[in-house]
Image (cartoon, rainbow, N blue to C red):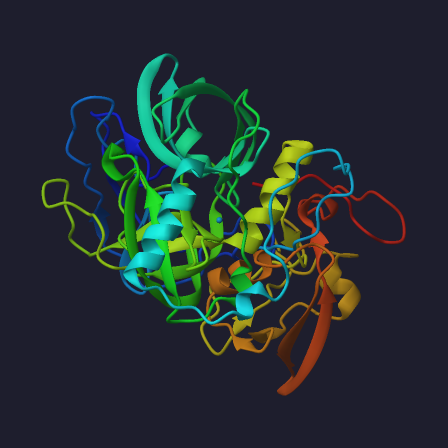
Amino acid sequence: MDDLFATPSSGLDASVTVAPPAPDKPADVGVGVNPAPAAAPAQPMYLVPPARPLEGRVSTIRKRTIAGIAGASLVLGALGGAGTYAVLDAISDETPQIPVAAPGSAETPIGAPTNQIAGVVAAAMPSVVQIEVTSDGSPASTGSGFVIREDGYILTNNHVIDQPKPGVTVIFSDGSEETAEIVGSTADYDLAVLKVGRTGLPALTFGDSDAVIVGDPVIAIGSPLGLDSTVTTGIISALHRPVTTRGQGAQAFIDALQTDAAINPGNSGGPLLNARGEVIGVNSAVAALPGATRSSGAGSVGLGFAIPSNQALRTAQQLIETGVATYPVIGVLLDGSYVGEGIKVAETDEETGQPGVIPGGPADRAGIREGDIILTFEGRPVTTSDSLIVGIRAKAPGDTVVFTIKRGGVEREISVTLTSSDQVDFFGDEQGDGGDRVGGESD
């Protein structure tokens, strides 16, 4: 997946445009499959500049990804929505588990004087790593990551390691190195789990990202521009930012935490910590000002974005257990040509016969129909396809969510129980029983 939070090798074109709208066809969003963007005014081209080459281990900035957000370009410095704290049943009591903060710990008042920040950093630093990636033997990129289990599991961004024939080396804070294997990755959430052949590693504890509020102090640790063990601080600037990025793989959708802590190329995959040293996010993206060029730079402008820890935890557990990750869907397509209040569920495509509401899918069973206008999701107004998809992917399969829809001028609330993406077929292979359609994930 293209990025700007991994530090890439030189010689690659870093310019990219925001994915163009498809106003004449329904957006293939399925609120669970990878969608085409909804109709929108044309976006300008933004250039994503590379970092300057540094001596030593540091490569030059490699690829790039931009996604429009409020008129700015969103540069991947890593990037990914849903989560619960339940440990997978398949993990036995004897198997090391990902540390999770005790319920209620987030209720402790947060304050972050300088000496407290130093204490948090000192405790967290041995768990944060630099990641170097080669492609078919040649240097490709560097990024960041952090230990999530003492038996060698490390979390980072998918786009950090997404290379042809990747070779991955993990560099610890003491300078020691280990070759890592890729346990599993997902472009949909832009997360990847690595494993090194060590035990007894200090794992960071996951906090509850749902308990985060605007104004909370945060600490980012990583290797921006290859400068390992770099620490920046700031606050949570906003919640539920719908961040989408499109790279070589599937489009990623993130219900992001926004922070003004400096996030730069190479910070990809590093932890965003609260004042207790708990992981509340995985640093992933940064907004670049329109008109940024390779020569003028596209570093931090105080608009960084992180994958919430609850989503990252659930996805990491899935990747460790199965090597792959699914996402929740409701089984509808959205009409990208619709202009008006809310988001419109698409009608059946006359050419392909593709229905707007998948028969037997979650939305169909709940009573959502083609042509319905979706006004709110979980009480929050939705105005774009991306914001709706991001909101749904921030949940987990099995969660029940509430939509406000308008049909024939009448508003009503409809509850839908989300289904895993591998249980809904958006492209016609009718299988299973009970009217449900079971099919492969669609890219």
Tell me: 391 left or right of 362: left
Can residue 442 be seen from the camera position used here? Answer: no
Q: Is residue 301 visible?
A: yes
Query: Picture quarter containing residue 47?
Result: top left
Coordinates of residue 321 in the picture (x, y in percent): 68, 34
Give residue 312's position: percent from left, percent from top: 54, 48
Name the foreground residue: 375 vs 105. 105
For the N terminus, the quadrant is top left
Q: Measuring 63% from the left and 77% from the top, which residue is drawn there? A: 405
Residue sitting nearer the eye, 267 or 176: 176
Viewer-proximal residue, 1 or 440? 1
As drawn, the residue found furthest toward the right would be: 434
Please tell me in which quadrant of the rendered image residue 104 appears.
Answer: bottom right
Taking the image as shown, residue 7 lies to the left or right of residue 381, namely: left
Furthest toward the top, the residue is 137
Residue in the image at 79% along x and 64% along y: 365
Up/down of 417 relative to 28, above or below: below
Residue at the image point whose x is 64% and y is 44% from the top? 326
Q: Total of numbered circles in the picture?
A: 0
Q: Along the line of sight, which residue is nearer the eye, 202 or 70?
A: 202
Q: Position of residue 20 (x, y in %)?
A: 36, 52
Q: Quadrant of the C terminus?
A: top right
Tell me: 357 left or right of 342. right
Q: Position of residue 293 (x, y in %)?
A: 14, 45
- Where 98 sits versus 337, above or below? above
Q: Residue at x 21, y 48 (%)?
A: 299
